Image: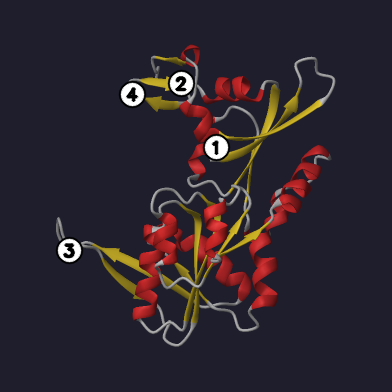
Amino acid sequence: MQILVLGSHRSGTSACTRLLNMMGAYLGAPESMKGPNPENRKGFWENDEVVDINKLVMHTVGCRWDRVVSMDLHAGQIQGFFNKPFDHLYAMPVFLEHLRPRFPVPPVLVSPDAGGVERTRAYAKRLGADLAIIDKRRAEKNVSEVMNVIGDVDGRECLILDDMIDTAGTMTNAARALREQGAKRVMAAATHPVLSGPALDRIVNSPLEEVIVTDTIPLREEAERTGRFRVLSVASLLGEAIKRIHHSDSVSSLFV
């Protein structure tokens, strides 16, 4: 999870902005920030102890912090761990700006699982596109998942939408299911290119023709060499959000 922390130096005389990877920071949390977990304590569990995320941010950033800005959290509930104002941004404006001129006829937008339907529906509404859903079912234990496609994708271009690509298993399996149902082309778009473990091999050996991501996480050189990735910048969106926060203007209106 990457977040942007806005605050001021301890002297209170100058602004301080930090972009940090909270997951990486948590793995290196000092012992002084760990302790027994009373029921009212906010933090992350580690074995039988909890790390106070607010102290962790102070330790990592090195300055007094006043606000948190994030983009496309994997789970919105993460905001509840913080006791400071929290702005949750969405990469949707960046993707829409790229997709609208590129596809005169909108592709079918596909949610790779039931949990992503709300996100995919929001994109489909703004693009005037059709919606499809991948339904994953496991009939019984030790039996491989069955991928069912809900929606008409035969002869259509399809774009799978997700918030991040980790090991790419869900994404590539969805791509194969779409091709089996007659999709003409299959592409994918996701905000965060985590690309851990076998992700690159899976993408290269899948029907995905292109994967559109943002630069919230720098794309690894190995990924660039595959020729499958297109990177969109979120710099202007973050900059506009910071400006609006500074002037006490509406941030949510960026996404209406």
Left or right? Give the position of 41 relative to 256: left
Label 2, label 3: how far apart the Cα atoms are: 40 Å
Secondary structure category for the residue under label 4: loop
- Residue 114 is situated, as x and y percent measured from the top left of the image, at 38, 61
Q: Which image quadrant: the C terminus?
A: bottom right
Up-down relation of residue 242 to residue 130 (above or below): above
Q: Is residue 138 left or right of residue 184?
A: left
Nearer to us: label 1 or label 3: 3
Which is closer to the viewer, label 4 or label 3?
Answer: 4
Residue 174 lies in quadrant: bottom left
Determine which residue is flagged by label 2: 41
Label 2 CA crowd tier, 10 Å (few <14, some 14–19, many 20+): some
Q: Earlier in the sequence, mark 1 or mark 2?
A: 2
Residue identified by numbered label 1: 79
Tag nearer the camera, 2 or 4: 4
Q: Amino acid at mark 4?
A: Asn
Tell me the residue that label 3 is attached to: 139
